[in-house]
Structures are given as structure tokens and as C-alpha cells.
Image (cartoon, grey):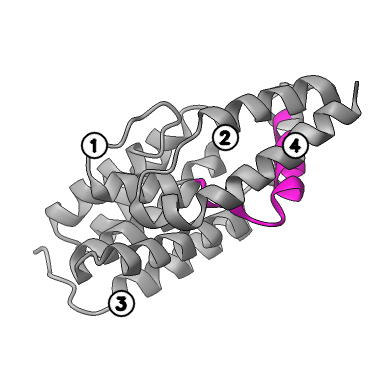
Amino acid sequence: MKVKHTDNSLLIEAKKFITDLFKERLDCKYVYHNLEHTQNVVRAIGTLCEQEKTDAQMTEILLLAGWFHDAGYVEGDKDHEQKSVEIALEFLEDQNASDEIQQKVSALIGATTFNHSPENLFEKIMKDADHAHLAHENYPNVLGSLREEWATCTEQSYCDIDWYKLNVEFLKKHQYYTKFARENWQQLKEENLKLIEQKLLNQA
């Protein structure tokens, strides 16, 4: 029988499950897509849900999707979104979560796929939370971790010039979707863009 979760017990169990999963099964070569990144995304979702005034049920569903959105990396980076969905569904089934929760969590994990265009507020929150780091003051360090992970895990290795060019192009194309992110994170992201552009100039 499916049960309706009316408190945060499901979120508490999800946090514990993902923390244990990553500690036990995530290869240490994933220096970007790891527990710290997941925790940062969950925090960003919390901020966006509060600012965008999502109701309690959707906030819970978004936070659940945040905890599981990169869980698939324990099985490698290929098709990790689909693997993340499968891990989430297995967990939610074990927790007797409703079909509605399972379906919505799955859809929101899918919304983090790189080229996916968000179709509603909740998908916009997921996309923005997953890219909250673009507006962080430690963005250059985060970028270094991503570069190291790509070189180790995907054999995509870049010289400094190509790496900075790639990320300048990405930052210029990237957009935040929620009102809060546009008003509060966009300017910080643009400052990071200038920083990376300067690093590129220094390579000339």
C-alpha cells in the first residue's frame, strides 16, 4: 500500500541513503559530481523553493529529486540521469512513496539532462539549482574539479586555452530561469565570466 508522507521522514531517509551510497560506491575520481555537489544542489533547491513559494508537497518532491539527481554516477557517467531515476525509484518504492511522488521525482531528475529546456517552474528550479555554482565565489575552483573529472573519467582533456574558451562559451549561452536566480545569481555569474575571460586573455 502506498502511503502519503506528511512529514520530512522521506527526506531524512533520502539524505541518509545518498550519503551512504556515495561514501560506499562512488569512485573517488568523481571530484565534481560527488556528495558535496549534491548537497549544494539540495541547498539551492531549498532557497529557490522558499523564494518561488512552492507548496510543501512540491518542495519535498524537488528536494528528493535534488538528492537523487546524480546518484547514477555510482555506476559511471554514461546515461547517469536514467541510472539516477532507477536508483530513486527503487528507493521510493522501498519507502512506499506514492506513485505521484515517484513520477514527479523521475521527471525532475530528467530535467537536469544537459540539453533539456525546462517546461514549468519546478523544472526551472531544478535547472537553476544544478547550475547555482556558476554564481559562487569559488567557481574557479569548482571548474578545476570539473576539468580534472572530465580528464580522468571521460578522456576529455583540454589545454588551458581550449578549456577557458569552452567555459566562456558555456557561460555566455547559459541562462537562469527562475525570477530569484535571474535577480540574484545572474550578476555573480557574469562576474565569474569576466574572471574566466581574463584567464583566457592571460594565455595569449
Please report whichever mark, 2 or 4, sits nearer to the chain's N-terminal start: 2
Please report whichever mark, 2 or 3, sits nearer to the chain's N-terminal start: 3
Taking depth in this image into account, of 144 and 175 the one nearest to the observer is 175
Taking depth in this image into account, of 111 and 161 the one nearest to the observer is 161
Q: Nearer the viewer, mark 4 or mark 1?
A: 4
The CA span between labels 4 and 3 is 42 Å
Amino acid tagged 3? Ser
The CA span between labels 3 and 1 is 29 Å
Q: Find numbered disc 3 in the image and state the secondary structure of the residue it sits on.
A: helix
Q: Dot 4 corresponds to which residue?
A: 196
Q: Nearer the viewer, mark 3 or mark 1?
A: 1
Taking depth in this image into account, of 22 and 144 the one nearest to the observer is 144
| Image coordinates for residue 62, horizontal then vertical, percent | 31, 57
Amino acid tagged 4? Ile
Q: Nearer the viewer, mark 2 or mark 4?
A: 4
At a point 75% along the width and 46% down the height, the residue shown is: 140
Q: Dot 3 corresponds to which residue?
A: 9
Please report whichever mark, 4 or 3, sits nearer to the chain's N-terminal start: 3
Q: Dot 2 corresponds to which residue?
A: 76
Q: Nearer the viewer, mark 4 or mark 3?
A: 4
Q: Dot 1 corresponds to which residue?
A: 119
The CA span between labels 2 and 3 is 29 Å
Whether residue 149 is in magenta: the answer is yes
Quadrant in which residue 157 is drawn: top right
Task: Please give the range of residues in magenta.
Answer: 131-150
Q: How many marks?
A: 4
Whether residue 75 is in magenta: the answer is no
| Image coordinates for residue 147, horizontal then vertical, percent | 74, 34
Please report whichever mark, 2 or 1, sits nearer to the chain's N-terminal start: 2
